[in-house]
Image (cartoon, helix red, strand yellow):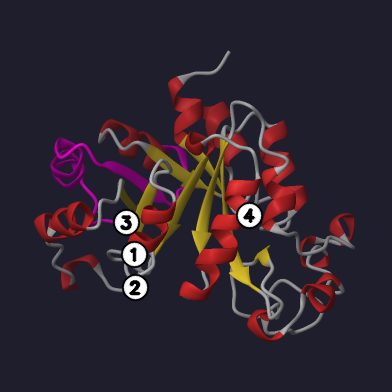
Amino acid sequence: MDTEKDKMIIAHRGESFIAPENTLASVQLAWNKGVKAVEVDVRLTLDNQVILMHDKTTKRTGDINNVIAKSTLDELRKVDIGVYKGKKWRGEQIPKLSEVLKTVPVNGKLIIEIKSDSEIIGPLVDVIKSSGLAAHQIEIISFNIKILPKVKKLLPQNKVLWLLDLDYYLPAWMLYVNTQKIIRKLQQHKLDGVDVWAGKKINALFVEQVKRCKLLVYTWTTNDIKSARNLLAMQVDAITSDKAGWLIDQL
């Protein structure tokens, strides 16, 4: 039986602690483990295909170094992005978003992080609309606040959240977070909430202020039980994890 906590755990790039990130293997493994929400990253290829990939190139996860924006889908399909995780995953290819959307179960949700610039919006919206999935099964996130309002206008029924790194790059003591300014920007662009780095700058007051305005608060990326329980105590709406299946079992 599903619990509320099950629905609050998001698999980061699929079950990426075990399987190669942003692959059909990692996404399917998450569904198989009972995870109800999976996050993936998307980029646009030279021939306007929406594919799964976090980085601008395949250098980190592939056996060939290709620049995504300068490569066709056929060229990228030749890259092995499984072998970096071990021989067991050898031969894993870069998937198209359309292929991943076909794996989403009836009670599942795919959270799509946009990594390309605005040129991806048209092709991305076309893929989403062609998927046959309900609006509540697909959510969009991005760090790029200029892209999100355009996506929300084209997909008004889908939840669209603004990614914030908060103190991911800077020590918490160096950073002042203006929560009210963040809320005003979300309301101005008719967005549905934030997805923030689970560092020291997120606290119960931040969460309470955002949620008081009927906005969502997701967090990334938590891989230990203590931190997850602290976030749940703050009443966040979702926790992103590289070990989502394990985290659900522990909770």
The numbered mark, 4 or 2, whose residue comes first in the sequence reads: 4
Q: Quickly name the residue at label 1.
A: 165
Discs 2, 1 touching: Cβ within 8 Å: yes
Q: Which mark is drawn over residue 169?
A: 2
* Image coords of residue 222 (percent x, y): 45, 48
Label 3 vs label 1: CA separation? 9 Å
Sort mark 4 into few (<14), some (14-19) or many (20+) by Cα contacts within 10 Å: some
The numbered mark, 4 or 1, whose residue comes first in the sequence reads: 4
**Is 125 left, or right, of 131 in this rendering?**
left
Label 3 vs label 2: CA separation? 10 Å
Sort mark 2 into few (<14), some (14-19) or many (20+) by Cα contacts within 10 Å: few
Q: Nearer the viewer, mark 4 or mark 2?
A: 4
Label 4 vs label 2: CA separation? 33 Å
Give the residue type at disc 1: Asp
Q: Which mark is drawn over residue 127?
A: 4
Q: Secondary structure at mark 2?
A: loop
* Image coords of residue 213 (percent x, y): 15, 40
Q: Which residues are magenta?
A: 198-225
Q: Is residue 197 visible?
A: no
Discs 4, 1 touching: Cβ within 8 Å: no
